[in-house]
Amino acid sequence: MKSAYNIEERLSLVRAAMGQEPFDLIIRNVKVLNVVSGELLPGVLGIKHGRIVTTQAAKDAETKNEYDGGGRFAVPGLIDTHVHVDSTLVTPEGLAELIVPAGTTCLLADPMEIANVAGIEGLKALLQAAEDLPYHIFVEVSSRVPTAPGLETTGGVLGLEEVKELLAWPQSVSLGELDPSKVLGLREEYFAKIQAAWELNKIANGHAIGLEGAGLDAYACAGLADDHECVTFEEARDRVRRGLAVLIREGSTERNLEALIKGLVKHGSELASWMFCTDDKHPDDIKREGHIDWMVRQAVALGLEPLHAVQLATINAARHFRLEQEIGSLTPGRWADIILVSDLNDFQPQEVFFKGKLVANKGRLLEKVPVSSYPDWLRHTVKVGRGRQGDHFALHSKGDSAEVRVIELFPDQIINREGRASLPVVDGCVQNDVANDVLKLSVVERHGKTGTIGTAFVHGFGLKQGALASSVSHDHHNIVIVGTNDDDMAACVRAVEETQGGMVAVLDGELLGRVELPLGGLLSEKPVDKVISELERLNESVRGQLGGVLPAPMMTLSFISLPTVPELGLTDLGLVDVLGHKLISVFVNE
């Protein structure tokens, strides 16, 4: 957590620097990568009260403990500049086992998912144990709960007063991502949230998807600081030219790193405005690939200098979020968040120190993180009114066929396109076209408020039979289902309700696999390896038995209903024209 200035502690640091007090720890025999000066220098790290005192401790300096760095490179702990912890499917303490051994010592988290389910109390419950984690977690205060007022049903709401309360927390660093509809629609309530952040000297994060020209100028004028939605280098460069920072994103389905880094290497650019984030990444992908460390490795492999890649992952992020006095560099007074690596060209963290304590070694977390006690009410948030029966998903039409709008998936991205299809009508009900991969998509309200169901069609999942569903569906987190038939879709809803949240696959009414997510319908309290095993089996069943073609089908499903990413979204209230910010008919001629 971001800590206040402590005079006694600082006096002790000063005395240690002058040789008047012993260090708590000295790490000898390292090459220190100074991301501020851009230098690589032989060093001896002196640490006191969990903070760096010096990188050039004297040979005869007094210390309580020593550690031999083995000639390895010492670099600052890595920073994820924008992440929804909820999207990892595990609790913050469970996540430590995955990210800390990978060198991530700081998350800048927007907990909008739990807030959309359970409001400010749910958000507080999720972050209650932040002080006990072996990594920093700072808060990007959720600006849009709900994301699309009037176009969706959510469980919770964060109004201006709640946002002001959260922004006042010392661990809050920014107002969370704000999409274009709020700014270009001149919604003063959101400008008031930006103002509240600015008054506390905190930035406001952007979400400028699809904007260019005058629209992007207008967006920047509102006081937004960055964007993590860039797909092409040209988009990113346009944002930098307008003073917006670019958060290069590499999640499970949002694969933007290659295009942006290639553009940086080819065209050149100042680098201070660039940094890394994961946004939404499932635990199996983190375990298989890595976290921010994987982005550093990939950036170097794509031609970026190792120093620059590490700067994107450390000091650039710290400066952008005004945290450079605490984290982001191995310089005096900063937290001793240190990674030791043998090769900067193949960035593989070996030892990880957090606040001067060795917390991970050779890919393994050294101590178990204390498990939080979450309120029982947070395990009872799935309250389905309709959706348990197949006929609840019927879409009625006259005639023998119907011309419908189709959500066309875009490979490796969360954006989509509007397509069209002519579908058969049998007994007054519009049918799927499984042969051409045009499948029914529905969102079932699960917060116990309206019982509404929105239904449309999607192309790109590739299912040949069965259905799959998830109670993780951004940002409203109702139950989203895609299927080849209505009865299996209803069976999915019943299965999700049974465990009070989760991801499931069903064939002929039988459950093929599931990931249980009872905490807010978003998270599991099980050990992370167990969650990964469940997710891998579920994905295998989707591909192996249902015919799915996507690399991360459940992550794709979780985003397909998002009403703020162009061109179409689907909520429990119906099909959303994202750019027009309005509900439209699934039928072309209505």
Image (cartoon, rainbow, N blue to C red):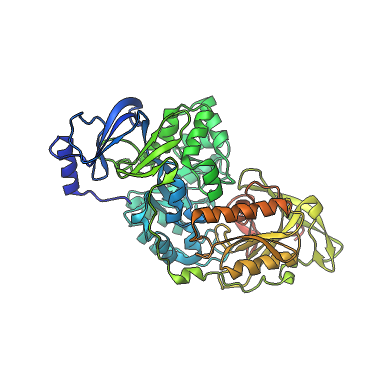
Which residue extends farthest right? 400
Q: Position of residue 67 (x, y in %)?
A: 29, 36
Residue 332 position by quadrant:
top left
Q: Position of residue 568 (x, y in %)?
A: 65, 53
Is residue 222 visible in the rendered image? The answer is no
At x 63% / y 70%, what residue is drawn? 452
Q: Position of residue 545 (x, y in %)?
A: 73, 54
Q: In this rendering, would 289 be left or right of 307? A: right
Q: In this rendering, would 226 be left or right of 135? A: right
Residue 312 position by quadrant:
top left
Q: Quadrant of the C terminus?
A: bottom right
At x 62% / y 74%, what residue is drawn? 385
At x 26% / y 42%, what residue is drawn? 51
At x 29% / y 43%, what residue is drawn? 356
Q: Position of residue 527 (x, y in %)?
A: 49, 57
Q: How many marks?
A: 0
Name above or below for residue 346 compared with residue 121: above
Q: In this rendering, would 461 be left or right of 534? A: right
